[in-house]
């Protein structure tokens, strides 16, 4: 067969030139595509450090929105870039942005917490889970806190609140409202929801863990993270023992949930472990996370509700009337029911307005798992995204006269994703219904049993690492039935 060797030689001679031209074309095309990407405006600050110092300084003064976010919104717009804790970060504000980010969990973004938070809350907790495992764990929690579970929880919470007040407030003139709510909500989570007895010192151990969740992950003796890690080990040992005992108890009964354990979350988690759905570490990590999520933020929400009631007597009068009417329809000593909870409409408006003005969380971080195009801007894959509660809670677009306390604003429909104290989307706080019960039931028994007033009406809120009333919100009390 005849072969044109001269043609082949010419082809091989031109091959490097063809390859170079092709590579140049592709490189040029890629560069053009990059140039077409428009990053959000903003300043990244110094390499690695970025604007971390400004971020944490503002946070420590509980002025994160006022001193860090708002000035940048005024300069760059509602979406801007920065660098925090070594990560390029895009901060988004507004209901539409909240909806876009929060509803696209697992599709465009995923949960992204600091290393220290993951280590202390648990790498196997629901906050680190995606897809099927996240849905399974959320389903277990959801069935526990569904309507049937809440019906069973209401009288348990009522008994806990009444016992606490009778034991710790009786005969006292001044009490720390915030400390009382922390102790009480902690006990409710353990005893009413999990079925675990609270022992001496447990709350202090958990609080040592909380101190380190946003601190640098430095295992240096005496550091916040070091102390928190030691406390986490203590908790893990305690919970491991509890889980093993519960597993043994259920094995003896044929892996069946007893009627009295039917709404106990720990029993359901252990059952999932015995069926191979989750591991022992997943049980422990999710119990730890739930305790923090359900008690610390709820305590702050209750404290801020009383702060607002103390500052706005006309709101308190209207709320008190609602609870007196409920009480007058109950027999002496009779617990509240879910029907009674439904009647606390104005009380829930007051609580929601308090959480709007003083959200228990500032927002949370996500991580882009692909390049995200939003409003003509590109959030590159791997960048962090921070959505904020204040970005809508303090926005005139969603809440008229946002700095005024006005519970009646919640009589009208609120723009979706504008009121986000519990987050939203697939990661909407699974325990928000429990938080609601805690708030409403505690308010009921305090306002119907005690005269009270704030000792420091203008008490500032500080942050370490979550917001709290700086003086513990002391109140003066006297029994209505003395």
Image (cartoon, rainbow, N blue to C red):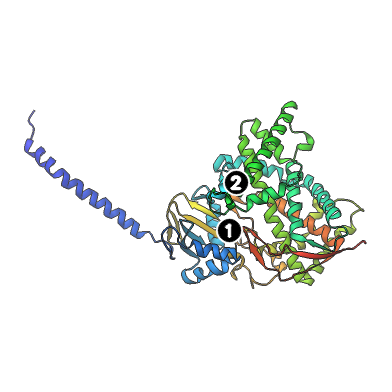
Q: To which residue does mark 1 refer?
A: 363
Q: Nearer the viewer, mark 2 or mark 1?
A: 2
Q: Residue at x 83, y 62 (%)?
A: 447
Q: Is residue 211 visible?
A: yes
Compared across the picture, whether 74 is left or right of 169 comes to left
Q: Position of residue 360 (x, y in %)?
A: 65, 59
Give the distance between the C-alpha atoms of the residues marked 2 and 1, in whole angstroms. Answer: 24 Å
Q: Position of residue 349 (x, y in %)?
A: 73, 63
Of the pair 284 and 318, the residue shown nearer to us: 284
Q: Which mark is residue 63?
A: none
Q: Position of residue 337 (x, y in %)?
A: 82, 50
Question: Going from the N terminus, do you reach mark 2 or mark 1 first?
Answer: 2
- Please rate how many residues cluster around mark 2, counting C-alpha atoms within 10 Å: few if below 14, some from 14 to 19, many from 20: many
Q: Position of residue 396 (x, y in %)?
A: 60, 71
Q: Are marks 2 and 1 in contact (CB under 8 Å)?
A: no
Compared across the picture, whether 124 is left or right of 252 comes to left
Q: To which residue does mark 2 refer?
A: 229
Instruction: Check the picture and name the quadrant holding the N terminus.
Output: top left
Q: Residue at x 88, y 59 (%)?
A: 171
Q: Residue furthest front?
A: 221
Classify mark 1: helix, strand or loop: strand
Instruction: Check the picture and name the quadrant holding the C terminus.
Output: bottom right
Of the pair 15 and 185, the residue shown nearer to us: 185
């Amino acid at each position: 067969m005849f072969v044109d060797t001269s043609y082949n030689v010419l082809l091989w001679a031109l091959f490097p030139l063809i390859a170079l031209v092709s590579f140049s074309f592709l490189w040029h095309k890629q560069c053009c595509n990059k140039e077409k990407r428009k990053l959000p405006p903003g300043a990244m600050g110094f390499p690695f450090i970025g604007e971390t110092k400004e971020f944490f300084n503002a946070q420590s003064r509980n002025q994160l929105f006022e001193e860090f976010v708002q000035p940048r919104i005024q300069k760059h717009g509602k979406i801007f870039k920065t660098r925090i804790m070594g990560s390029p970060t895009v901060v988004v504000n507004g209901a539409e942005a909240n909806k876009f980010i929060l509803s696209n969990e697992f599709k465009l973004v995923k949960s992204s917490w600091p290393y220290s938070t993951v280590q202390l809350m648990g790498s196997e907790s629901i906050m680190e889970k995606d897809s099927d495992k996240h849905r399974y764990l959320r389903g277990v929690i959801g069935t526990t806190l569904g309507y049937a579970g809440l019906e069973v929880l209401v009288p348990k919470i009522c008994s806990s609140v009444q016992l606490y007040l009778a034991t710790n407030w009786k005969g006292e003139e001044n009490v720390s409202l915030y400390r009382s709510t922390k102790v009480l909500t902690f006990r409710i989570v353990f005893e009413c929801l999990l079925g675990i007895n609270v022992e001496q010192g447990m709350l202090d151990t958990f609080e040592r863990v909380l101190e380190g969740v946003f601190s640098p992950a430095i295992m240096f003796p005496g550091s916040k993270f070091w102390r928190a890690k030691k406390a986490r080990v203590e908790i893990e040992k305690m919970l491991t023992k509890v889980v093993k005992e519960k597993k043994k108890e259920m094995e003896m009964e044929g892996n069946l949930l007893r009627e009295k354990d039917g709404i106990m979350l720990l029993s359901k988690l252990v059952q999932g472990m015995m069926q191979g759905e989750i591991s022992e570490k997943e049980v422990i990590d999710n119990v730890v996370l739930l305790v923090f999520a359900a008690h610390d933020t709820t305590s702050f929400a209750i404290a801020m509700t009383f702060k607002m009631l103390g500052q706005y007597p006309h709101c308190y009068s209207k709320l008190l009337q609602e609870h007196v009417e409920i009480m007058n329809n109950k027999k002496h000593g009779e617990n509240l029911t879910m029907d009674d909870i439904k009647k606390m409409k104005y009380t829930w408006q007051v609580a929601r307005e308090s959480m709007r003005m003083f959200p228990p969380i500032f927002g949370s971080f996500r991580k882009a798992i692909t390049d995200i195009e939003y409003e003509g801007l590109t959030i590159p894959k791997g960048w962090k995204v921070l959505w904020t509660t204040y970005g809508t809670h303090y926005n005139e677009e969603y809440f008229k006269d946002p700095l005024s306390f006005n519970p009646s604003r919640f009589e009208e429909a609120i723009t979706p994703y504008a009121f986000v104290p519990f987050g939203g989307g697939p990661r909407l706080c699974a325990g928000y219904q429990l938080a609601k019960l805690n708030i409403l039931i505690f308010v009921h028994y305090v306002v119907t049993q005690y005269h009270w007033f704030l000792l420091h009406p203008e008490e500032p809120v500080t942050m370490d690492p979550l917001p709290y009333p700086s003086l513990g919100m002391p109140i003066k009390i006297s029994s209505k039935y003395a």
